[in-house]
Image (tube, rainbow, N blue to C red):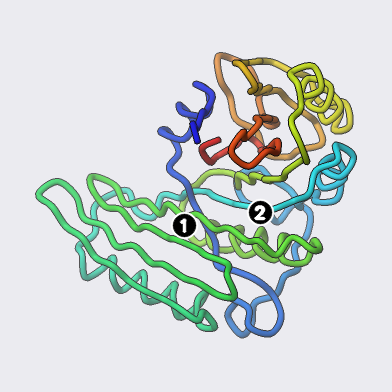
Amino acid sequence: MKRKISNLCIVLILLAVAAVPGFAAGAGSWFSKNGSARGSRGSAPMGSSEKEVSPIRDQVKLAGGSLLQIQMSGWALVKDGSMSLPELEELAREVRNTWGSAAQKAEIRPDETDSMRQVVLSLEQDGDRATLTFHSGDQTYLAADASTRDVRGERKEKAVFFAMERLLKRFRSGSCIRTTYTSVLPGKLDTGRMEQIAGQIFRGLDGEMEEEIRDAGWISKTGYSDRIPCELHSGGKRINLNVALRYNDYEGRTYLWLGTPVISIPY
């Protein structure tokens, strides 16, 4: 299956390496004992605000799509300077004990070369996965990514979002949280129908389209909506809404991706 991604997304992914959370709420959660899944408006880092889940899910449903997976990512500056490999390992263990205490699988993998050192923390719980990479060169960054296939309700999504907020706020600066919703529609949609669905989503979120890329059986639209708190800047324009559709001829169905502020996975 041929995988495509817009030039805009490639640039953004290279500039802001994916980033992630600690996890869920309730029994078997990836929270510390004192953690919770609650958040309050104005408490989010880097200019974001409380996550508005329902309107985005509503757009997926109105388009006729079935939600398959939700992925969230972000990054943060840990230190304006380098850290030794033992220091990175200690930091990874601290995060593991705080955020991954209930994980069924937790693995720490250190790596060092002449020019850099990094420690990767991988967590898995009930099919949900998180990868946190502590990378140190001239500066030290946290890059992380988490995904969940528990899309039956909003509880897990909100828990992951607020967990990531708390993780990123521990450090000096970082990105807003990027979320990608992957859904599927039955059968093959022609380009005209894909255009209709993408336009419907933008209208449903009061968005204005800024960029459009298309190819045979594939389209991607990027723009801005006041209803989405996080935003990026590209070519002097604000963007925080990215919609793409592509037909998968091997599976015989059409995929729909909705990203805020951009789609942060290959498609």
Give the residue at x 77% y 40%. Answer: 185
Give the x, y percent position of residue 11: 45, 26
Residue at the outermost left position: 114
Question: Is 184 above or below relative to 101?
Answer: above
Alpha carbon distance from label 1 to label 2: 28 Å
Q: Nearer the viewer, residue 169 or 148?
A: 148
The crowding category of the residue bearing disc 2, from other C-alpha atoms within 10 Å (few below 14, some 14 to 19, many at least 20), is some
Question: Is 30 above or below relative to 109?
Answer: below
Is residue 167 toward the left or the right of residue 50 in the image? Answer: left
Give the mark, 1 or 2, whose residue is nearer the N terminus: 2
The crowding category of the residue bearing disc 1, from other C-alpha atoms within 10 Å (few below 14, some 14 to 19, many at least 20), is some
Q: Nearer the viewer, residue 9 or 119?
A: 9
Give the x, y percent position of residue 198: 78, 26
Q: Which residue is mark 1?
A: 171
Please state which amino acid type lies under the numbered disc 1: Phe
Give the residue at x 78% y 60%. Answer: 40
Q: Is residue 256 visible?
A: no
Question: Is 249 above or below relative to 124?
Answer: above
Q: Quadrant of the C terminus?
A: top right
Is residue 252 toward the left or the right of residue 103 in the image? Answer: right
Disc 1, SS: loop
Disc 2, SS: strand
Please state which amino acid type lies under the numbered disc 2: Gln
Give the x, y percent position of residue 266: 51, 37
Give the residue at x 68% y 46%. Answer: 181
Give the residue at x 42% y 33%. Answer: 15
Q: Is residue 216 visible?
A: yes
Q: Nearer the viewer, residue 208 or 90?
A: 208
Q: Which residue is mark 2?
A: 69
Give the x, y percent position of residue 108: 32, 71
Q: Which picture quadrant has residue 25? A: bottom right
